Image: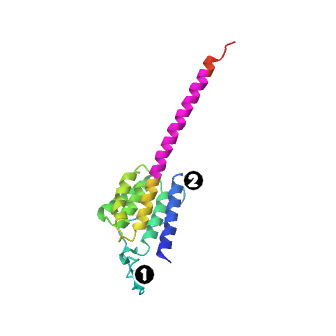
Amino acid sequence: MNVRLAVAALGALVLALALAGCVRGSTPKAPVTAPPILATPAVPAMPAAPAMAAEEEHDVIRDARPRPDEAERLLAYFERLKRLQGAELAREHESARQAYARTASEFNRIGYAMTLSLPAAPFNDDTRALELLQPVVRNNRNGLRALGVLLTTFIQERRRLGVNLAAAQQKLDALRSLERRLIERDQSNAPRK
């Protein structure tokens, strides 16, 4: 499968899952049995890359290829996170934090940032998640960079929407207050019988 197509499809899945997480359902779902993030996985030897034409070789950074299944594992991890609640979610957050503390790999950075970016979680910390993702996004030779960019963009967009929502709520509250004052004024100026 084309790597760019796979990353785009996985990115769309992450975005859909993240947007679905903004509205929590009332019915709990069974957890998916994706392995928790503990450390960067051991990777089997990759077969030699096929020879490329000289014009294609300058467009591809060989070091930027993700290890097999890293992006898929992170997406499955995010899907699993979305289904966790309460104590299980807190344990998973702590597990991701410890994994990152042991090994600050791109894999663990993204996994920990995913836990911190969960909107309804008590430990939600978008600022810290963005800080964790900065090195991943800046490193052009990182195979998980595209996933880091996607998650960063999602967090920033969600923050922007939150600010817009707060501004809209303030305007709505001001209009309601104005309406109440107008109704009260009309009632006080109405002729009495």
Above or below for 3 versus 180: below
At label 1, counting other C-alpha atoms closer than 10 Å, the crowd grade (few under 14, some 14-19, many 20 or more) is: few
Which of discs 2 and 1 lies nearer the camera? The answer is 1
Task: Name the residue tied to disc 2.
Answer: 27
Above or below for 41 versus 189: below
Above or below for 183 versus 47: above
Q: Nearer the viewer, residue 176 or 52?
A: 52
Question: Which colour assignment does the render follow?
Answer: rainbow
Task: Name the residue tied to disc 1.
Answer: 56
Q: Position of residue 146 (x, y in %)?
A: 42, 67
Q: Position of residue 84 (x, y in %)?
A: 48, 57
Q: Which residues are magenta?
A: 158-185
Q: Position of residue 182 (x, y in %)?
A: 59, 25
Q: Nearer the viewer, residue 88 or 19?
A: 19
Looking at the image, is mark 2 or mark 1 earlier in the sequence?
2
- In the image, what residue type sits under mark 2? Thr
Q: Give the structural element (helix, strand or loop) at label 1.
A: helix
Q: Is residue 56 visible?
A: yes
Q: Residue at x 56, y 32 (%)?
A: 176
Q: Give the structural element (helix, strand or loop) at label 2.
A: loop
At label 2, counting other C-alpha atoms closer than 10 Å, the crowd grade (few under 14, some 14-19, many 20 or more) is: few
Q: Residue at x 48, y 42 (%)?
A: 166
